[in-house]
């Protein structure tokens, strides 16, 4: 079997076009575009690139850009004060504090200050609680992008045997909870899992999010499985995933490439979350005016 390739760029492009259309409708209705406030502290080169990509994508979708770049030596109190101002600003629909923040700042505490309705990264304790409970809320971008890719390719999840490799707060845990919410049977593997290949090869849907280049090979994959590779690792030959693409593609039914799989979905879902947040604020405003 040679797997069909899941085209994350194409799916992300469709999401972005759809968001841009809905943004235009919102502007027509309310006279105000959704706004994303990105906060970048310091000059970490990867963070600088990520934030620039997010801002460009926002501009293309018609979302207003409220970026703030703070120096590395800014105090925790000053970043906190900026977040509070953004929380109160009606022009700001979503707030994104780019992580990691420089040593000396506590990124988790700062993230926790973001108002839940503006938490477009879905990482505050309240958003996490809503995800665990399965109540409405903003979900983390990469995990929700994984689900959107599976949906775009009509992969059945209800009752499916799914295995997630990785248990981080950013990817592994939320993607597992989202799969559970779709009635999949979910197994979470991590660095201390015994016999990874035995567990993974049970999966109808295998999600790799360990951050280890080519951790998963053909022996980890059931013939006909769907394989989603979240991993982005720098190797000599460029970016590689957590899955050994060449051998796994011979066994799987569907597979994401790296790059061009999950990566583009993350930004697309950030745009969608910003639009969702703007919608939440619009309906909250309508309720308080009623
Ligand atoms: P992390 O380092 O926080 O977590 C890695 C997880 O993998 C841990 O839970 C650990 O227990 C597990 N793990 C480590 N070694 C293992 C092993 N040998 N067997 C099984 N499990 C093992 O990483 P993260 O933030 O969750 O990111 C994971 C990967 O996804 C990274 O490559 C990261 O770059 C990538 N990522 C991509 C996107 C995207 O937009 N495409 C977004 C976020 C993260």
Image (cartoon, rainbow, N blue to C red):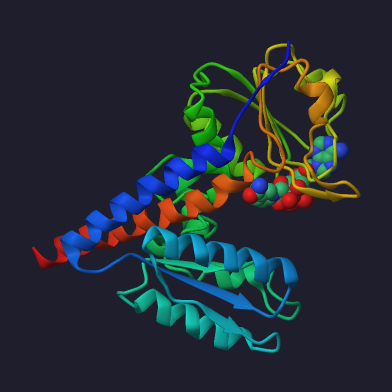
Residue at x-position 76% and y-position 77% = 103
Q: Nearer the viewer, residue 144 or 133?
A: 144
Residue 51 in percent (x, y) is at 59, 67
Give the quarter of the image for residue 289: bottom left
Left or right of 202? Residue 126 is left
Q: Quadrant of the C terminus?
A: bottom left
Residue at x-position 57% and y-position 43% = 143
Q: Residue furthest right?
A: 236
Left or right of 19? Residue 215 is right
What is the count of numbered marks? 0
Residue 247 in percent (x, y) is at 84, 22
Q: Residue furthest left?
A: 290
Evaluate whether residue 69 shows in this view: yes
Residue 163 in percent (x, y) is at 68, 26
Residue at x-position 39% and y-position 74% = 87
Q: Nearer the viewer, residue 193 or 22?
A: 22
Left or right of 44? Residue 238 is right
Evaluate whether residue 191 shows in this view: no
Left or right of 231? Residue 6 is left
Q: Quadrant of the N terminus?
A: top right
Residue at x-position 70% and y-position 85% = 72
Give the quarter of the image for residue 65: bottom left
Residue 125 in percent (x, y) is at 52, 58
Give the quarter of the image for residue 49: bottom right
């Amino acid at each position: 079997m040679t797997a069909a390739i899941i085209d994350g760029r194409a799916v992300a492009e469709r999401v972005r076009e759809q968001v841009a259309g809905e943004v235009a409708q919102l502007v027509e209705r309310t006279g105000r575009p959704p706004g994303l406030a990105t906060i970048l502290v310091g000059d970490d080169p990867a963070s600088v690139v990520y934030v620039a990509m997010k801002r460009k994508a926002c501009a293309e979708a018609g979302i207003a850009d409220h970026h703030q770049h703070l120096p590395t030596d800014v105090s925790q109190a000053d970043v906190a004060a900026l977040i509070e101002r953004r929380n109160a600003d009606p022009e700001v629909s979503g707030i994104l504090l780019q992580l990691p923040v420089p040593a000396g700042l506590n990124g988790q505490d700062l993230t926790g200050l973001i108002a839940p309705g503006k938490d477009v990264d879905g990482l505050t304790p309240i958003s996490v609680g809503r995800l665990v409970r399965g109540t409405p809320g903003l979900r983390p971008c990469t995990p929700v992008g994984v689900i959107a890719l599976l949906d775009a390719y009509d992969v059945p999840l209800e009752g499916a045997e799914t295995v997630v490799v990785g248990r981080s707060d950013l990817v592994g845990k939320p993607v597992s909870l989202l799969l559970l919410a779709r009635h999949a049977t979910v197994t979470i593997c991590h660095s201390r899992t015994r016999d990874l290949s035995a567990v993974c090869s049970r999966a109808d849907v295998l999600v790799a999010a360990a951050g280890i280049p080519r951790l998963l090979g053909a022996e980890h994959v059931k013939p006909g499985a769907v394989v989603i590779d979240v991993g982005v690792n720098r190797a000599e030959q460029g970016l590689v995933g957590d899955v050994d693409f060449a051998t796994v593609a011979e066994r799987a039914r569907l597979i994401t490439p790296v790059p061009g799989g999950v990566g583009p979905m993350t930004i697309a879902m950030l745009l969608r979350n910003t639009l969702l947040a703007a919608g939440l604020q619009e309906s909250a405003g309508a309720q308080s005016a009623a």
